[in-house]
Image (cartoon, helix red, strand yellow):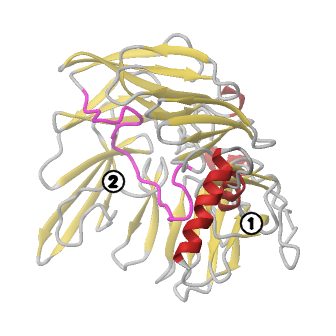
Amino acid sequence: MRCWLILAVVALVTLALTNVWNPWPGVWAWVNQSGPLAEPAPAWQQRVGALPRTVTIAGGAVIIDRGDAVEGRALASGGLAWEKTGISWNAVAGEGDGAVVLTGELLTKGYQVLNPYDGTVLRTSTDAVGVWTYRNLLVDVRCFAAKDCVLSAWDPRGTAPRWSTDLPGIQVGLNPDNPRSFGTELLTTPRVSGDAAGPQPAPALLGLPIDNKVYVVETGTGRVARVADPGREERVTTAGGRVIRVLAQSADGTCYFTVTGHEAGTGREVWRQTALNLRTTESAGCAQRADPSGGRNVVLGVAPDRREVIVDMFDGRLLWTGEPGDRVLSVDDQFVAVRTEDDRLLRGYVLGQEGVAWSRDADGDTQAAIARYAVVVIEKDPDRVVALAPVSGAVLAEVRSGADVLAVGPAGLIIGDGRDIGYVPYGSQLADGGSSDQTGGAPGDGDADAVCADPSRPNCGLSGK
């Protein structure tokens, strides 16, 4: 048998080398063929050149980070529009038609600003060592010496900086793309990318780690409003336009917490919450090594009675208090998605409004992520991906799929499995039971204008919600 197999292989190789018959392209195509990512099938499905690290919807373009390359595709068809190789990092700033793509190389100063539709270069920086990308702003830093740096803010498509300010150094690290800064951490779920909603709006205050201190910079003016020097038992971060100090003291075999919010310019204490646990400590002790979870202006905490709460960082108000055993799965500045203690319901709330906004059957494996335009729900057994309107819970899209959700836009989702990606527009429901009710209006966050109009939260919608 082995002799016959060897003879068959030799014959096939001989036929291929003599151009008589070459079966290998067909075999390779069969091995690489892709099945549908979802049922119903996506509006389009494409295979990219390598496993994507991130996918971002930028207006009418889809930007795919492949690790050593970046490519732009048309959102309408998935067709490849442009590609740039030999790139170590890329990021998206801006939104809609004003979006741009930033690209650069590891351990090399500078970056390029590209048009997301055709990849043309709009602007080049030759000396920046780090850059932060936001929906309404990009901030870069240039250094002339170890203790001589300049921080500058730009409109995403701007040709001159809005402002520039001097800093005594900066801690950037190896990756120039969105280096470490103090703020809040988004709650994520493994099946939904943490960057699915695209770039976030710039915070009112940017907290930068320099020489074991926190330099607090106003993103509107560039002014260094405060230099905070945290104590040994203290963590300093920024959220809601305030400098937040979290004191965790060990005594009586437990941790005692005090959280205070301060004006950046004067340092004046504006509010104080005692016994509020923001989960910044490790379970083994009171050492704080993590920023609190939440949105730009709100954080998730645990009250003394062990109920989860959402706190407004501007004035310390409790915007939402859960029932005993409720678990927050995702939260942003406007909405919160919660799984009930018995794991039977998923509930949505609008922060600042009384009562449950919507409710949906769930189980212990149900996950959810709020991604600006939709609440993405991941269900198992069977695998389903569901997009809900954040205000009403109306079903925007529902498909059978075990794929991950890579990007969420105003009109649909990008899902992916391996190198295959596909676009699921809103309105794609299951033929056998998916709801077509969309009485909640447009999926975007314009319905939350009333929340952002609250005068006590002045940067809720900073240059765009």
Q: Is residue 66 above or below residue 128?
A: below
Q: Is residue 303 above or below residue 290?
A: below
**How many residues crowd mark 2 within 10 Å: few (<14), some (14–19), many (20+)?**
many
Q: Amino acid at mark 2?
A: Asp
Q: Which residue, given by chain and number where applicable, does mark 2 sit on?
A: 291
Q: Residue at x 83, y 62 (%)?
A: 428
- Numbered circles on residues, count: 2
Estimate the x, y position of residue 140 in percent, counting from the top left: 40, 23
Real-space CA distance between mark 1 and mark 2, rounded to the nearest whole angstrom: 36 Å
Q: Residue at x 45, y 34 (%)?
A: 89
Q: Residue at x 55, y 67 (%)?
A: 6
Magenta segment: does it hold 183?
A: yes
Estimate the x, y position of residue 183 in percent, counting from the top left: 38, 46
Can residue 372 be seen in this snapshot? no
Q: Is residue 108 above or below residue 20?
A: above
**Secondary structure of residue under mark 2:** loop
Please report the bounds of the magenta region as a residue range: 170-195
Q: Which residue, given by chain and number where applicable, does mark 1 sit on?
A: 38
Snapshot quadrant of residue 168: top left
Estimate the x, y position of residue 42 in percent, counting from the top left: 79, 58
**How many residues crowd mark 1 within 10 Å: few (<14), some (14–19), many (20+)?**
many
**Secondary structure of residue under mark 1:** loop
Can residue 383 be seen in this snapshot? yes
The front one of 439 and 266 is 439
